[in-house]
Amino acid sequence: DIVMTQSPSSLSVSAGEKVTMSCKSSQSLLNSGNQKNYLAWYQQKPGQPPKLLIYGASTRESGVPDRFTGSGSGTDFTLTISSVQAEDLAVYYCQNDHSYPLTFGAGTKLELK
Amino acid sequence: EVQLVESGGGLVKPGGSLKLSCAASGFTFSSYAMSWVRQSPEKRLEWVAEISSGGSYTYYPDTVTGRFTISRDNAKNTLYLEMSSLRSEDTAMYYCARNYGYEDYWGQGTSVTVSS
């Protein structure tokens, strides 16, 4: 199984700061045939289901603010929030969409100072 | 508007069975694969089943293989998850999700508690 490792487990930031969080996979999520990375990012706010933010490692889902950026390839991926807003308080999960079983990271909890 | 509404959760004894349902609306249900994903009380997410759009192909992780069965009724726009031989570690919030290579829409979930 592909193990997804997220770091840090929590982040405490002030509104307006830039935030970067990491997701590493134990095997490559790059499909060599189409050169696409099968990595998704989800945001989960308290009491709500996860919401898709990013797929294909870097494609923003429709309606997601452009302050959210996904990057990386192979086994190393990053989610960046350029200027954190109060409504971004949430847990962020990455997911292996490359191969079964689909697996999730343990999440990075974003807290505001 | 895509809507996914889960039902059927509850309290069940270890070794018991339960069947979850997910009513879909707002999209052409028969055109999409569908998934079940659960979230433990510790907030860990675990994918537990996927079914192809026509229902011919199903996929499970080892943790539930042989105990869980995913199915769908495209005429009723409904997804199911039959769970048997339930264990305490199956206690979780169960979400159904539309699968487009990734889970792009999620329901609000139905809670399953396995306890004596």
Image (cartoon, coloured by chain):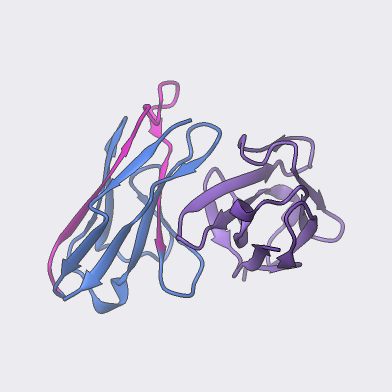
* In the rendered image, the vertical position of residue B15 relative to residue A84, given as above or below: above
Q: Residue furthest top?
A: A33
Identify the image quadrant of the C terminus of chain A.
bottom left
Observer able to see residue B23: no
Residue B47 appears left or right of B33: left
**Residue B2 % position (x, y):** 63, 67
**Residue A41 % position (x, y):** 39, 52
Instruction: Tell me the residue at 32%/30% (across/down).
Output: A74
* In the rendered image, the vertical position of residue A97 relative to residue A109, given as above or below: above
Residue B83 appears left or right of A98: right
Instruction: Tell me the residue at 79%/58% (across/down).
Output: B19
Q: Is residue B13 magenta?
A: no
Depth check: A67 or A10 in front?
A10
Instruction: Tell me the residue at 52%/47% (across/down).
Output: B102
What letter labels the chain drawn in blue? A
Q: Which residues are magenta?
A: A16-43
Depth check: B18 or A77 in front?
B18
Observer able to see residue A38: yes
What letter labels the chain drawn in purple? B
Instruction: Tell me the residue at 67%/63% (across/down).
Output: B115
**Residue A47 % position (x, y):** 48, 75
Q: Residue furthest right?
A: B75
Q: Residue furthest front?
A: B116
Res B108 → quadrant: bottom right
Residue A9 appears left or right of A38: left
Residue A104 appears left or right of A85: right
User: How many circles with numbers are drawn on the protein?
Assistant: 0
**Residue A34 % position (x, y):** 43, 26
